[in-house]
């Protein structure tokens, strides 16, 4: 109840934005022009959605899809200055003042609120000027953190995350990729499995926040301790109910199973946790393949690639250290993702694989593009998406509107799975990021500070990644 009262108290001080008709591409809000729009060597796609792709996207050329799900960043924060991409170096605050985005380390010792109420504060009815009002925590004292009301207005210098820039510049980058939900990690990891976070198939109630135990610790799933509760949001946008975070609704894994294809979900630890999405879906958690298809720790994916046992559909979630999550990451995230991409690139799987690198929520960071609003919980702010494949368009910036449902729809249309009939229905299938008529491109290794051996030898950790927001 303490958690519910806190969130309701914040919500009373916020006037939620009214739902609007969705418009592809969002709005630049008249802010500082992109620092990267002049890069003529990059191809920028049209904002128009275009025609739907064929039912079997790629005509069966893709046999494996890896969804690498990192943590808590926006394009303005993590890919600022990417050639061709729509990023800015300043943004509005609640007083109507321009705030310059300051460079901060990937490992900066502070975190910004990214609960649903924080989205409402930052979105501010579509004005996109409330990021200075988001709460934040500084772990190492004020002297090492920016001023409280400036913390969300920041970007990570390219040299800190060069492997990400290398991937985005070599392949396709989507700069109109929106987080589907307007909240933190736990519901986001439900959306990337089911296209929704509803408590059941026919319910309109969605899990909207991170679950808390009775001891005020974050966790989530059917294995969560007794007394753990998660807030729900209804169709009117009210968060006033809580339930135990163990749900039952269809997931993409069901469609994969129905086609006699294989799937794996790699996660940091077994059991309950915010990022352990399958643990919160009852029929998966207590199904016969949970013990074989839900795998920890994440570096097992490197071994499966080298052994030739890569599944058809794969989710890869990180350890907290490699997550990019503000305040807890040790900065190894870009090397971690590069190690997975390089493992596929040098394997027999390269010519038949697509790797989708996405971030699960905005993390509280400033972003200037206004997200379309379908309802009081969808869509959230932009998150980065890199599309890597021998058939991905080179140096391509996608301006079509995407969301987490686009990732699900890409998998559905690649393997002819049918539809989950959730947010995948309205979403596109990322088809503009590919050219399946081209000859498969040869793989070029992604240089990174840390090698795959570093992650293969990394000790396990049970530390909670989201211990403040």
Image (cartoon, rainbow, N blue to C red):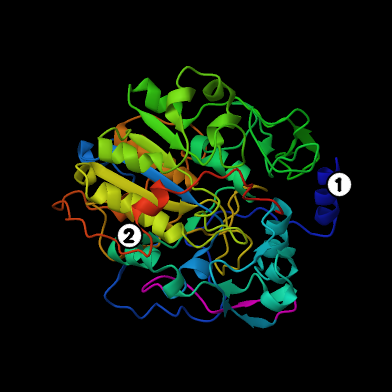
Q: Is residue 413 magenta?
A: no
The residue lying at 69 percent from left, 59 percent from top is 113
Q: Is residue 149 above or below residue 396?
A: below
Q: CA distance from mark 2 to mark 1?
A: 43 Å
- Among the 4 quarters of the image, the one containing residue 237: top right
Left/right placement of residue 209 relative to residue 102 reads: right
Q: Is residue 146 visible to the viewer in this orientation of the structure?
A: no
The label shown at residue 465 is none
Q: Main secondary structure of the magenta part?
A: loop
**Label 2 belongs to which residue?**
172
Q: Quadrant of residue 295?
A: top left
Q: Which residues are magenta?
A: 82-96
Q: Please report whichever mark, 2 or 1, sits nearer to the chain's N-terminal start.
A: 1
Residue at x-position 29% and y-position 71%: 42
- The location of residue 341, given as percent across then percent down, is 32, 52
User: Which of these two is toward me, 328 or 86?
Assistant: 328
Left or right? Give the position of 125 relative to 324: right
- Structural crowding at the residue carrying mark 1, measured as other residues with C-alpha within 10 Å and reported as few (<14), some (14–19) or many (≥20): few
Label 1: state its secondary structure. Answer: helix
Magenta highlight on residue 89 = yes
Q: Please name whichever residue, 82 or 264, is drawn nearer the observer in this view of the structure.
A: 264
Rendered position, 378 above or below 40: above
In the image, farthest residue toward the top: 288
- Local crowd size for mark 2, using a 10 Å CA cut-off: few (<14), some (14–19), many (≥20): many
Q: Which residue is tagged 1?
A: 5
Residue 28 on image: x %, y %: 53, 72
Q: Is residue 382 above or below residue 59?
A: below
Q: Quadrant of the N terminus?
A: top right
Is residue 126 depicted above or below 249 in this figure?
below
x and y, in percent, of residue 144 in the image: 67, 76
> Which residue is pictured at 57% across the width and 26% down the height?
249
């Amino acid at each position: 109840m303490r958690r519910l009262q806190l969130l309701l108290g914040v919500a009373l001080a916020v006037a939620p934005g009214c739902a609007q008709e969705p418009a592809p591409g969002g709005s630049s809000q008249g802010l500082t022009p992109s620092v990267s729009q002049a890069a003529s060597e990059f191809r920028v796609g049209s904002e128009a959605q275009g025609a739907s792709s064929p039912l079997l996207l790629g005509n069966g050329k893709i046999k494996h899809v890896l969804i690498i799900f990192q943590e808590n960043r926006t394009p303005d924060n993590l890919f600022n200055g990417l050639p061709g991409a729509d990023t800015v170096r300043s943004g509005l605050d609640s007083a109507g003042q321009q705030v310059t985005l300051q460079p901060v380390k990937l490992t900066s010792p502070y975190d910004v609120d990214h609960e649903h109420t924080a989205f409402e504060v930052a979105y501010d009815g579509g004005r996109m000027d409330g990021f200075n009002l988001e709460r934040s925590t500084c772990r190492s004292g004020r002297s090492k953190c920016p001023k409280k009301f400036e913390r969300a207005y920041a970007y990570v210098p390219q040299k800190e995350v060069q492997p990400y820039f290398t991937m985005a510049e070599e392949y396709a980058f989507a700069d109109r990729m929106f987080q589907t939900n307007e909240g933190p990690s736990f519901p986001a990891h439900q959306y990337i499995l089911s296209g929704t976070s509803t408590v059941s198939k026919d319910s309109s109630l969605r899990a909207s926040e991170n679950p808390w135990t009775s001891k005020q610790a974050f966790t989530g799933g059917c294995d969560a301790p007794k007394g753990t509760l998660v807030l729900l949001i209804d169709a009117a946008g009210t968060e006033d109910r809580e339930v135990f975070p163990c749900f039952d609704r269809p997931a993409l894994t069901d469609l994969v199973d129905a086609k006699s294809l294989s799937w794996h979900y790699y996660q940091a630890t077994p059991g309950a946790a915010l990022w352990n999405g399958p643990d919160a879906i009852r029929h998966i958690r207590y199904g016969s393949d949970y013990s074989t298809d839900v795998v920890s720790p994440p570096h097992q994916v490197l071994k499966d690639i080298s052994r030739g046992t890569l599944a058809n559909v794969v989710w890869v979630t990180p350890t907290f250290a490699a997550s990019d999550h503000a305040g807890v990451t040790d900065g190894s995230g870009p090397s971690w993702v590069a190690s997975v991409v390089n493992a596929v690139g040098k394997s027999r799987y390269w010519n038949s694989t697509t790797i989708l690198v996405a971030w699960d929520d905005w993390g509280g960071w400033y972003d200037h593009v206004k997200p379309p609003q379908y309802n009081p919980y969808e869509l959230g702010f932009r998150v980065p998406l890199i599309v890597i494949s021998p058939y991905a368009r080179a140096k391509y910036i996608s301006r079509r509107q995407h969301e987490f449902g686009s990732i699900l729809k890409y998998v559905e249309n690649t393997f002819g799975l049918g539809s989950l009939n959730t947010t995948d229905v309205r979403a596109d299938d990322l088809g503009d990021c590919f050219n399946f008529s081209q000859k498969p491109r040869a793989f070029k290794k992604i240089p990174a500070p840390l090698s795959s051996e570093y992650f293969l030898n990394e000790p396990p950790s049970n530390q909670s990644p989201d211990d403040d927001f």
